[in-house]
Amino acid sequence: MSAAHEYPDERSFHAAWHAACARSGGRVNETELALRGGALADRLAWIFISGYQAAVRRCFPEFATTPGWSCLAAAEAGDGAACHLEKSGEGLRLSGQKSWIAGAGVLDSLVVSVGADTGMCFVTVPADAAGVRISLPRTPGFLGELTQGVADFDGVLIPDDRMLRAPERRLEFRGAEPLYVLLALNACLKARAAEVGVPEIAVLADTAIHHGRTLPEVLGEKAAILPGLDRLRALSRETLDAAQAVVEQVPSLAASWQRDGRLFAMFGLETREKDA
């Protein structure tokens, strides 16, 4: 049995995500973005990007002015010039390079980190702004349906209201990303379990989702978010350990499970079999 809808490439999923998740007369909160995107997903690449989009919006609400996809451009390119800002007669200009631009093929905007530690700031630029060039140097081997590019910035004009001096947001993102990716994962398994008639998996996923809904309000509180995420991982692992009966009935999900399963380890979800 296949998922109700299959999205074999980035553009098809982006269109479906936009229809289900983008703002239309009101702002959809980040938790709902992760859950709606996850419920659409038929493979791990789309689970990841659904949670990732929610995390970017949660951590940079000042920049969430467009309904499309955004990327936190934080990874420095190995051989490229580090991003920096220079004053010009018109204001500030951004130059430099960032690697690992997720969803590069359909991206609408980027949130770019500049500087380090307490001196870090963030700027946002449209993906099609003058001086922005996004290239796709290789076909990714991991989450291969998701385009993963490199961004070059050549004197990109940054208006005053497009810069944010808030270095703590990078740390907040470290909690937001796993939170929303795990919510998207559980939403996917809940939706697919309902489609293929395995209600017990939907119940497990819903338990994890219920707990995850309590965590956004404590993302900035280390003493609360760390044990909260640990609990969400434990609940999500229970869902995963029981999910094979669902996964094997959705071919696109099963293939992705085999191909991109290390996504689970990235977010602390090694299965009990692997832990044993």
Image: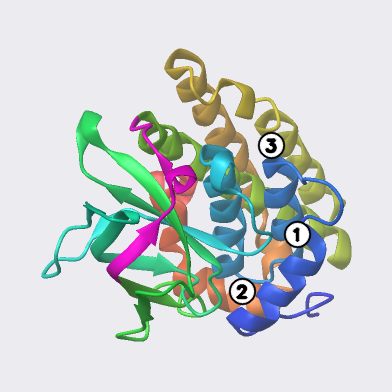
Is residue 276 among what the camera can see?
Answer: no
Q: Are marks 2 and 1 in contact (CB under 8 Å)?
A: no
Q: Quadrant of the C terminus?
A: top left
Mark 2 neighbour class, 10 Å CA radius: few under 14, some 14 to 19, many 20 or more:
some
Residue 270: percent from the left, percent from the top? 44, 48
Secondary structure under tag 1 reads: loop
In this rendered view, identify the residue nearer to me: 123 or 210.
123
Closer to the N terminus: mark 2 or mark 1?
Answer: 1
Image quarter where the N terminus lies is bottom right
Query: What amino acid is found at the position of numbered circle 2 in the picture?
Result: Ala
- The amino acid beneath tag 3 is Ala
Residue at image coords 68%, 25%: 214
N-term-proximal mark, 3 vs 2: 3
- The residue labelled by disc 1 is 22
Instruction: Please tell me how crowded label 3 is: few (under 14), some (14-19), or many (20+) other residues with Cα within 10 Å.
Output: many
| Residue drawn at the location 48% of the way across and 70% of the way down | 127
- Residue 55's spot in the image, x, y percent? 55, 45
Cα–Cα gap, marks 3 and 2: 21 Å
Q: Which residue is mark 2?
A: 254
Classify mark 2: helix, strand or loop.
Answer: helix
Is residue 269 in the magenta section? no
Query: Residue 139, can we see it?
Result: yes
Bounds of the magenta segment: 153-167
Where residue 108 appears, x then y in whole percent? 56, 68
| Foreground: disc 3 or disc 2 | 3
The amino acid beneath tag 1 is Ala
Q: Is residue 213 above or below residue 154?
A: above
Q: Is residue 222 left or right of residue 115?
A: right
Quick one: which residue is furthest to the left in this view? 79
Q: Which mark is residue 208?
A: 3
Magenta stretch containing residue 154, yes or no?
yes
Q: Earlier in the sequence, mark 3 or mark 1?
A: 1
